[in-house]
Amino acid sequence: MEILLLLISFSAFVFFISLYYFSSAKENSKKQAAACATKKEFSKASFVIPCTIFIVTFLLLNKIIFAIIFVILYLYFSWNIKHRNFQKNQNLIDRQVMEALSIIKSSVQVGNSIQNALIVAQNELKEPLKTEFRAISSRIALGVNVGEALEAAAKNTQNKELKFMFNTLIISKDTGASLSGIFEKINDMIAQRITIGRKISALTAQGKMSGNIVSSIPFVVIAMTYLIEPEITGVLFTTFAGNILLLIIVVLTISGSFIIKKMTEVKL
């Protein structure tokens, strides 16, 4: 009976993780990861869902240790999903910045002002960068100076290349410098950065895979041992000392996985 309740709790946990994943993917397809509204929504979800998991698990199993374990697992997997989606979003923005540079440079070369060039980029770009340019155009339409609108956009974004592009536009607007040569150098720099990033991802892929395998080994061993000797392994689930040991296993495994991910993550 207790194992059945544990399976029900695990199913609820998987449901919450799936719900978080799909809602996060949907949100990232519409908004940039650095948007303020997304931060507020995430802060609410990061508080409500763990509390719900804790209460549901505690009511089903009547064991606070298992409730803590499921909350820890949820926090780790939700952070992992959010971090992965954020990296994908940033890589997509890096590629779109190159496109935006070409659009703005071509628009300025035919005689348009920076303000009109930003509107052209907004109309031609796709999400998620389109949202950022739409926000700039909205600020300008409300009477905000172009330089101030670009400064606000540079402060809000977490993407280095996008921030660099906005700062370049601000300096060019203030000094009257030519954008063509500057944008070509920025374009080459971003292309080299993307190429280096892909090489690093290929070189660290084996380490990341090894980390995932090593992290899953303790749980696979527990499951196999339970199938072979359920009475011995059942102590982990039925006694308080076993629950504490299981909590230690989960914490150490997640800590090791986190450290491996950070070791194989290279920031450019």
Image (cartoon, grey):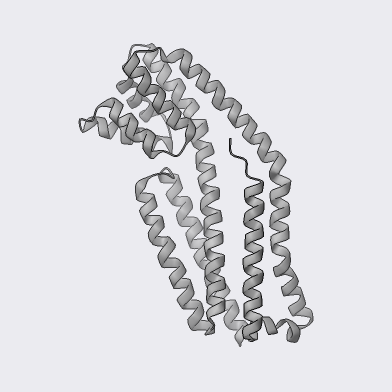
> In the figure, 232 relative to 180: above or below?
below
| Of residues 251 and 63, the one drawn nearer to the viewer in this rendering | 251
Query: Could you tell me how many numbered marks the image carries?
Result: 0
Q: Name the image quarter holding the N terminus.
A: bottom right
Instruction: Residue at 66%, 81% (x, y): give it.
Output: 242
* Residue 164, position as x, y percentages in the image: 45, 28
Where residue 228 sits, quadrant-wise, is bottom right
Q: Is residue 57 visible?
A: yes
Q: Is residue 26 left or right of residue 135?
A: right
> In the figure, 185 relative to 197: above or below?
above
Instruction: Residue at 53%, 76% (x, y): give it.
Output: 67
Q: Name the image quarter holding the C terminus.
A: top right
Where residue 234 sits, quadrant-wise, is bottom right
* Residue 198, position as x, y percentages in the image: 64, 35
> In the figure, 38 relative to 64: above or below?
above
Q: Is residue 127 visible?
A: no
| Of residues 253 and 6, the one drawn nearer to the viewer in this rendering | 253
* Residue 266, position as x, y percentages in the image: 62, 40
Query: Furthest residue to the right?
Result: 228
Instruction: Residue at 62%, 78% (x, y): give it.
Output: 244
Where residue 258 sits, quadrant-wise, is bottom right
Instruction: Residue at 67%, 81% (x, y): give it.
Output: 236
* Residue 147, position as x, y percentages in the image: 30, 26
Query: Furthest residue to the left?
Result: 143
